[in-house]
Amino acid sequence: MYQLNQILENKIINNLISGFERCPHQLNKPHESDAEIIQFENMQLAVTTDSISEEISRGLYDDPYLIGWMIVTVNISDLAAVGATPIGILISEIIPNDFSDEKLQLMQKGISDACQEYNTFVLGGDTNEGENLVLTGTAIGICIQNKFLSRIGSKKGDILYSTGEFGLGNVYAISKLITHSKNKIVYKPIAQLANLDLIAKYASSCMDTSDGLISSLDQLMRLNKVGFELCRDWQKSVDRNAYRFSEEINIPAWLLFAGQHGEFELVFTIPQELNKSFIDEAFECEFYPIELGKVVSEEKIFLPLYNRTVQLDTVFLRNLPFETKGDVNHYLKVLLEYDSELKKSPNLNFTTI
Amino acid sequence: MYQLNQILENKIINNLISGFERCPHQLNKPHESDAEIIQFENMQLAVTTDSISEEISRGLYDDPYLIGWMIVTVNISDLAAVGATPIGILISEIIPNDFSDEKLQLMQKGISDACQEYNTFVLGGDTNEGENLVLTGTAIGICIQNKFLSRIGSKKGDILYSTGEFGLGNVYAISKLITHSKNKIVYKPIAQLANLDLIAKYASSCMDTSDGLISSLDQLMRLNKVGFELCRDWQKSVDRNAYRFSEEINIPAWLLFAGQHGEFELVFTIPQELNKSFIDEAFECEFYPIELGKVVSEEKIFLPLYNRTVQLDTVFLRNLPFETKGDVNHYLKVLLEYDSELKKSPNLNFTTI
């Protein structure tokens, strides 16, 4: 059976929190939801915190406007994934003393524009001087109908959907960190609040794709003790520009699911018996979720690839960024090796090679 | 008249938030309270965020246990200052890859012990790798009796109190950053939740002393358009160990109010007509607040010193850390010069020298 602790990120978190007592008003257990859920009288409050630090120090985010936009988006996306409407966000900024006033204004504009996009507000913050730019956001929201969406609840036969297409996050990362491509990839993801009422009404589980699609599916697999089989036509869920870019640089499109710089879509499962009602209601509101595949009993991620169905080695895929320690060229090289080997051996366990 | 923007810190904050819309559910205006207050149905939620970054990079906090303790304490103190009982805290940690597991465990123990002290819980968090250790906490609480305490409300004649003594924060900073004294100063401040019911019931205004006593009084002065006259026997409010240390190193004790590394006491004002009831109730619960002085109409901070009453140049005192850009030796030198000049000229405006 797959264990949460096979994934280094889960292990690190479990190690950090091992000595902490749990709040009696908290409804979610660790790992079980994208935001923390606190029962308050008859309300469910959702809170979440996320920093942007490595993305800046590694050069992934160098546009101050994008940094401002992202610190709001990453946190609001976690609220969306638990079915919560945002109330506001607190932002702490560590600002180097050589960060120009012009850059600062752009960053604040990114924050302000994102808040407008999500109809939310900066409630407060903190500012410090520091060597490196670090932003930390903490978003607060209220769960729709006081019923939070969690990562737990997928059952065999459920249909797997996403709110939108994938791949732009990863091609953006490749273009910034590896190819330094002149073809600018426009990356300005939007947290998926738009059809949250409907998702909250029908979904059996939900998670955002901030770390890429495969990370999310792997985590849902571990938590629910089920697997996922992606559709034969999974290419339809790859963003057109991302697809074109991956072709240009000879990267197989499926790797755009595997990289860990995501798009902040939601992936969610709908029980089979509710699927018709869900789709009917969705189409009525002009919401067209993408059908990605289905929930299966075997705890694996199956992907139709190279005229077969491969079982992805998600332990390898998720731990690789940690194991390659931020060396993105090496990371991509190993991913491409894995892809070559997959062609020969569809049930490859790459970790042990 | 004193303006908020005379103080560089206020000016920086006003600049950062100038493009932001205000949340319609938010009850406090900027600067008016130590935490943000959000109206939720019939509840007042208090939220606040604070990072620890400069304190680490400058060597002020080098004990991982203290760093953990402080990230909880600084945030819970802000909740206390608005009369809120904590529900929990979210903590984001940026951890350098050479930070040992032993240090990490100590830091987490500091967090865990502080949560126990305040009967609160870590609700969630985030972890990133980074060059420098940075911790950001966001605390959430509920205002007692749904009536938040703000910094606004002091009137002429009100009595000024503190929950405890001052000076340890600043002598700790001197011992760590300047004298590198062998006499270890024990610094483990406690956020003042203990008698909050009573303070919330009676106080006309309240603020914590995280940036030292004079910073807090100056901010209350600007917000309320009143001044403060400290008692002749203000020395009684200096911690005994701090006093002894200041004598040893020839630093006048009043400067322990001026330095900006505080003790997380609360300063609050009680209307004259309620003072007797307040004190009677306080003594009944064995709570002995320290009477610091009184609120006066002239917008100045008066301190009995060198057989006279001096008017402190609080613009100079508050802006000096920014103007000396972290050069603590220079900071202390200028403070001592100011003290020498005060002996000659009690109404000294030092900023213009």
Image (cartoon, coloured by chain):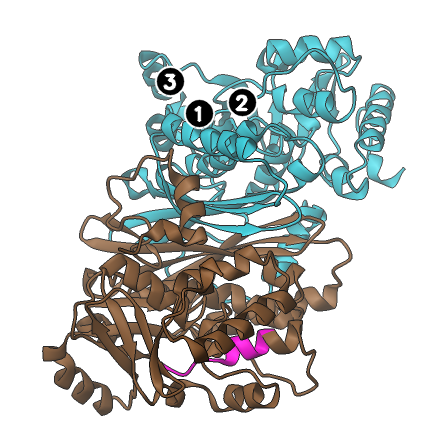
Chain colours: A cyan, B brown
Q: How many marks?
A: 3
Name the residue rendered at 37%, 62% in the picture.
B87
Dot 3: element: helix
Going by the image, does A167 lie left or right of A277? right
Which amino acid, mark 3? Answer: Lys
The label number, if any, that marks residue B228 in the structure image: none
Crowd tier of the residue under label 2, counting other residues whose Cα lies within 10 Å: few below 14, some 14–19, many 20 or above: some
Residue stretch in magenta:
B164-173
Q: Quadrant of the C terminus of chain A?
A: top right
Q: Real-space Cα distance between discs 1 and 2?
A: 33 Å
Q: Earlier in the sequence, mark 1 or mark 2?
A: 2
Q: Real-space Cα distance between discs 3 and 1?
A: 8 Å
- Which residue is at the front of the view, A206 or B263? B263
> Of tags 2 and 3, which is closer to the observer?
2
> Residue B220: x and y, percent?
30, 63
Dot 1: element: helix
The label number, if any, that marks residue A188 in the structure image: 2
Q: Which residue is mark 1?
A: A272
Q: Is residue A243 visible?
A: yes
- Which residue is at the front of the view, A328 or A3? A328
Q: Chain of mark 3?
A: A
Name the residue rendered at 67%, 33% in the picture.
A300
Q: Is residue B169 magenta?
A: yes
Name the residue rendered at 47%, 22% in the picture.
A163
Q: Chain of mark 2?
A: A
Instruction: Indicate whether A28 appears above or below B148.
Output: above
Going by the image, does A38 lie left or right of A156? left
Q: Earlier in the sequence, mark 2 or mark 3?
A: 2
The label number, if any, that marks residue A276 in the structure image: 3
